[in-house]
Structure formats: C-alpha cells, structure tokens
Amino acid sequence: MLDEGDPYTIAWDAENECILYIDQTLLPERYEQMRCVTVDDLARAIRRLEIRGAPALGIAGAMGVALAAVRSRETDLQRFSGEVGRAGELLRGTRPTAVNLAWGIDSVLGKMALAASVAEAKEIAVAEANAVAEEDELTCRRLGGFGEELFPERCTVLTHCNAGALACRCWGTALGTIRSAVEAGKDVRVIACETRPLNQGSRLTCWELARDGVDVTLIPDSSAAYLMRKGMIDLVVVGADRITKDAVFNKIGTYMHAVAARHHGIPFYVAAPVSTFDLSREETDITVEERDRSELAYCGDKRLAPESVNVLNYAFDATPLDLVDAIVTEIGVLRPPYTESFRLVRDKEVRP
Ligand code: MRU
C-alpha cells in the first residue's frame, strides 16, 4: 500500500478543487505528491506517465472532467457542456490504448448530461469522479479475492510492468491478486520483469512490493523464458489496458511471456476490472500507442543508439485469448471458451 498520509495514487482535493497524485516518474527515488489545477496540467502528467496504469487513467479521466467543470466560468449550460466536452476530448487523446481513460471520462460526462443547471452539473461531476475512484478500490479488493484462489499455497509468480496500487487507486489488479494471496497466508514469491524501456517493473512494482514486505526479485525481461525452462516460475499474472473480443492489450512484452508460458505449460492469467473490457472491438481496431524514440535511444542524457538509427517503440502488445488461461475480474474468474464467459461481462451493468 502507499503512504498512510497519502494512501491513494490519485485523489480529489475538495478543499482546493484540484487533483492530487503521486508522480510515478520520480519513483523509486522520490515519493512525492503533486497537484493538477488545470486540464492541461493533467494532460501533460498523463502523457509523461506521471499518472499511468489503466485503472488510474480511468480515475484521472473522471477527475479531469470534474476539474474542467469546477474551473469553468461559463454560466450558460449549453456552452458549459461544450467546454467540458472539449476538455474530455483533449484528455481522451492523451493515451489511445488504455480504454479505462475514455471510460472514466464518459462515466462523468454521461451523469452530467442529466443536470438542469451549471451548478448541478458541477456537483454531479465531482460526486461521480469520486464514485469512480472509490469503486476502483472495491473492485481491486474483490478481484484480488477471486484471483488469490488461483495461487497454490506456495508459489513463484512472474509479473510484467506495474499493475499495482500505483496503477489503480490502491491495492492493484495483478498485484492485487498477489497482495490478496499474501494476506490469505500463502507463501508467494514474485519475479518482476524490469519492463523496458520505462522500467515500470523495476521502478514501481519492486518499490511497491518491497515496501509491503513481499518477496520480490527483479529480472531483465529477456530472462523470463529461461526461468520458466528452469522450473522457477509457477504462474504468470499481468494486468490489461484493454480486452477486446479476441485479445488482451497490455504492456509491450506481455505477449512474449504468454507464448513462453504456454510452451512451458505454465498458467498465464490476466487480472483486470470489467471497465477494461471493450467487447465491441477486435484487436485490429485498436490503436497501439507508439512512444518517442528517446525512450529507447537514450538513458537519461546518455545516448544508447546511433542518432541515425530507426526506432520502433510500441508501448503495448496484444496477446491472443487462446494463450490466456483465465481472466480475473471483480465479478469472478472468466475461463475459456471466452465467447461464453464474456457474456457475464456483457450482462453486467457497466457505468455509465
Ligand atoms: O504505459 P503504462 O505504464 O501506463 O502501462 C501500464 C500497463 O501496461 C499495465 O500493465 C496496465 O495498465 C494494467 S494496470 C492495472
């Protein structure tokens, strides 16, 4: 968990009408809470990955709309709605792959559309943004409880990127299942892949788990298959940025772990809330974010590649569902055939 004083990755500051968040680019060196007072600040924080991880982006989207609403000086409801809607579009464009961002924005905009005045719309926006955040905590706890049942009493779990408290309001999805298993008294060891090029595994997952006293070992991404071959991994659990009808989108490198796990007969699990599902779309409909060449070509100021070389820096990949042994959600564990089990997700009343 995060600090007792600031227990949440992202929160609404009612007194100052702004967003408080932990700047994840500073970790593991510094744990520092920042504030966003404008939607432009928030868009910048999301693009820079100061706020990152699918559920946290959902909360950021929801709070971003609330921020635009409370800061607006418009008194005419129609013009006010237009202004807030444009803020939502700006935020939606900051990161295209994690569906939770758009979901959080639409949850608040959908509720605000029912307001009869600007004052009422502002109130609704803040209440709904806080509801999205609070629900995320309950969701992660429920999901963790279902997920821990998949863990043997004693096991070593491989995870990739950071799907932990820092990627959500608290607790986490993939790391939520691990926390719940530890809480249930299981002897769990974690292998954290560093997650090049931005190192969410080494900087964030190792930081969170070590602080919680969970046994965690850092490895380079490239050694995962060898550890599986040596019998050192019992299961894999990762988060997700979007789940379409045929694939799981998650941090680049996830797909290679799924292929290697299947080859070695190791269960490969995904942990994600219902808000991460996008079942009207297929893999080929989704835009995979490509990030700047500097993330690969430099380490700080040090150049790692010739200036002239081409760089291809996809932030996410897609793992076909036939490599996924189960998807852990807050409504239970979904298993193949997913055409059947996804009905449960479709039937759930999803916000808005
Ligand atoms: O680029 P990031 O750091 O936002 O990518 C995050 C991931 O890929 C996580 O695994 C995913 O969002 C799940 S978080 C519960």
Image: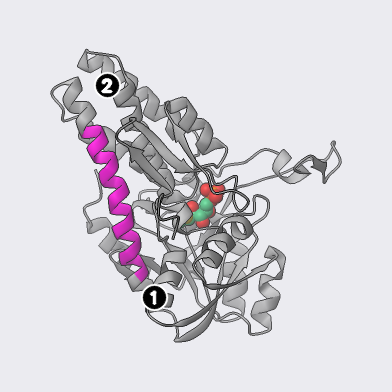
- Side (left or right) of 291 relative to 348: right
Residue nearest the observer in this picture, 70 or 14? 14
In which quadrant of the rendered view does residue 179 lie? bottom left
Q: In which quarter of the image is the C terminus?
A: top left
In screen coordinates, is 112 left or right of 300?
left
| Farthest residue, direction left | 116
Of badges 2 and 1, nearer the viewer stands 1
- Three-letter code, disc 1: Glu
- Image quadrant holding the N terminus, namely bottom left
Q: Which of marks 1 and 2 precedes in the sequence? A: 2
User: Regarding mark 2 in the picture, which secondary structure is present there?
Assistant: helix
Question: Is residue 140 covered in magenta?
Answer: yes
Give, as a single range, the part of the protein colored magenta.
Answer: 124-144
Question: At which x and y percent is residue 324?
Answer: 48, 69
| Mark 1 burial class by Cα count in 10 Å: few <14, some 14-19, many 20+ | few
Label disc, if present, on residue 81 of the rendered structure: 2
Query: Circle 1 is placed at which residue position?
Result: 183
Viewer-proximal residue among 226 and 119 = 119
- Pinpoint residue 100: horizontal percent, then vertical percent: 39, 46
Numbered disc total: 2
Residue furthest to the front: 5
Secondary structure beneath dot 1 equals helix
The answer to whether 16 is drawn above or below residue 23 in the figure is above
The answer to which of 332 and 195 lies nearer the viewer is 195
- Residue 99 in sight here: no
